[in-house]
Amino acid sequence: MAHAEVIPILDFGSQYAQLICRRVREQGVYSELMRPDTPASKLRAMNVRGVILSGGPASVYDAGAPMCDPAIFELDVPVLGICYGMQLASKVMGGEVRPAAHREYGRAQLHIHADDPLVHGLPQDTTVWMSHGDQVVALPDDFVPLATTPTCPYAAVRHRTRSFFGVQFHPEVTHTPRGSQLFKNFVYDICKCRGEWTMKGFVDEQVEKIQKQVGSGRVICGLSGGVDSAVAAALIQKAIGKQLTCVFVDNGLLRKHERDLVESTFRDHFHIDLRVVDASAAFLGDLVGVTDPQEKRKRIGHRFIDVFKQTVREQLETGGSSGDASSDRVRFLAQGTLYPDVIESGHGHAGTAANIKLHHNVGGLPAELGFELVEPLRELFKDEVRKVGEVLGLPEEIVWRHPFPGPGLAVRVMGEVTPERLRVLRDADEIVLEELIANDLYRKTSQVFAVLLPVGTVGVMGDGRSYDSVIAVRAVESQDFMTADWSRLPYEVLARMSSRIVNEVRGVSRVVYDISSKPPATIEWE
Ligand code: XMP
């Protein structure tokens, strides 16, 4: 989509490239990651307002080190080089880059000694985050130093006459507490943007785009209960109303009240044509006797595709129940694909950042189904999707929902999945969530749930000995779910969860708390 104001990031493989992109967007200007060697002519054709060169793991003197088109420094727009981006620009313009005496990783004290729009509003002395091996040791003739750290003489620089700026530190990470001021300066004072990228504007643009793509065709959207598919559905509904049909598959592996929430939100509140397919018997049948986690995932994934296909065939292609326009074949499939998925699957750019794709997404549908995809959230990060959800009036329980895995409770019942074991887990999980919400901790945590362990444990209940199950409580905080730390939930809250679970859930005599971070553990237990 063409954006009035765009500042792309040329990605040299930085682990922080997505963060740079988010920081620019937080300033109200659209940004996206592009290949490091994107030709200047392409950027000119996009009418970019500025360009940012990201950091990266290479050394500018490495054979095969990623290079930018030198002509981007001749474009008549400001360029900001961060870390490797600054080193590369310095080399191109005649400076010298060398390995620093010590690889610098961590916080450093920045001292600003020159007045310049890039550093306006920053305190003269401030903390910044460094992560580099090389640094610029001799500035090109036309460069002016703006700031130093004790080990880095050129921590921020600018070109004397051209609009090039460079920083050796990382303003995009939270460890540089005043970093957003620097982006604000670059975006507004230097690139002269107006800040027109808003989620309200995004919704209006997408509504038009969806209408154009779909025409009078029919769209089907699988709802998972999660925020992405919910926001995609609400957005498409706004664009094409009754041409949208949503399908929610009850696989028998949902949390308590999950199905009710989806039904009340989409059918009662949004008046979406929602088909709920109860396929729990088939899913649970597939899982009889299965204990291997990957095998569980595989069977659930296959069954999901079968059920979805069959639903489309039976309910929609033959006219279904909604009446209007139903004789048309459904040609479009809506999905809540997000920008990080697009980047990770390699379509976004040729960045070299380590690609750690941990899970085959069980909710996914194969391309052979023959649908044309409608993916209105492809440009967005998760926090932006939540904002779109708010603009569209989705309830808080959906917008701020913790993630839930496609294979559902099957990967939280360790060992065999049976209706009785699911009952135990569901009841315990409900208590965990109730206590979390009652203590105002839901929004402060990233993902919290109960796990049923495959061991018996001795207890005393009343006067007798019991031999019952163990529930583990898992609570984590995470930015991107690639790494996570266990939540320091208050002892009183844990105590209450534990006593309520043991007292209220038949079949549980012990509760333990998981204090593992990721890595080396994962968030889910299977
Ligand atoms: P782990 O357990 O790998 O999980 O730390 C990271 C995030 O991914 C979710 N997850 C899944 N999501 N299908 C999904 O759709 C899966 O098979 C799956 N396994 C884990 C997990 O809940 C966490 O948010």
Image (tube, rainbow, N blue to C red):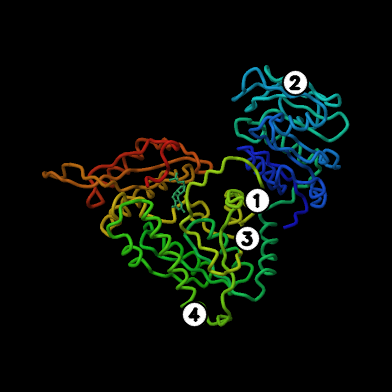
Q: Position of residue 112 (x, y in %)?
A: 74, 23
Q: Position of residue 514 (x, y in %)?
A: 36, 38
Mark 2–mark 3 Cα distance, whole angstroms, equals 46 Å
The amino acid type found where label 2 is placed reads: Val
Disc ID at residue 320: 4
Residue at 57% in and 50% down: 382
Tell which tag, 1 or 3, sits nearer the viewer.
1
Q: SS of the residue at dot 2?
A: strand
Residue at 54% in and 67% down: 368
Badge 1 is on which residue? 348
Mark 4–mark 1 Cα distance, whole angstroms, equals 38 Å
* Residue at the extreme left: 463
Residue 307 image-quadrant placement: bottom left
- Quadrant in the picture for the N terminus: bottom right
Badge 3 is on which residue? 376
The mark that comes first in sequence, 4 or 3, is 4
In this view, the residue in front, 96 or 215, is: 96
In this view, the residue in front, 37 or 373, is: 37
Q: Check if mark 1's residue and mark 3's residue have beta carbons within 8 Å.
A: no
The amino acid type found where label 4 is placed reads: Gly
Is disc 1 surrounded by few (<14), some (14 to 19) or many (20+) residues within 10 Å? some
Mark 4–mark 2 Cα distance, whole angstroms, equals 70 Å
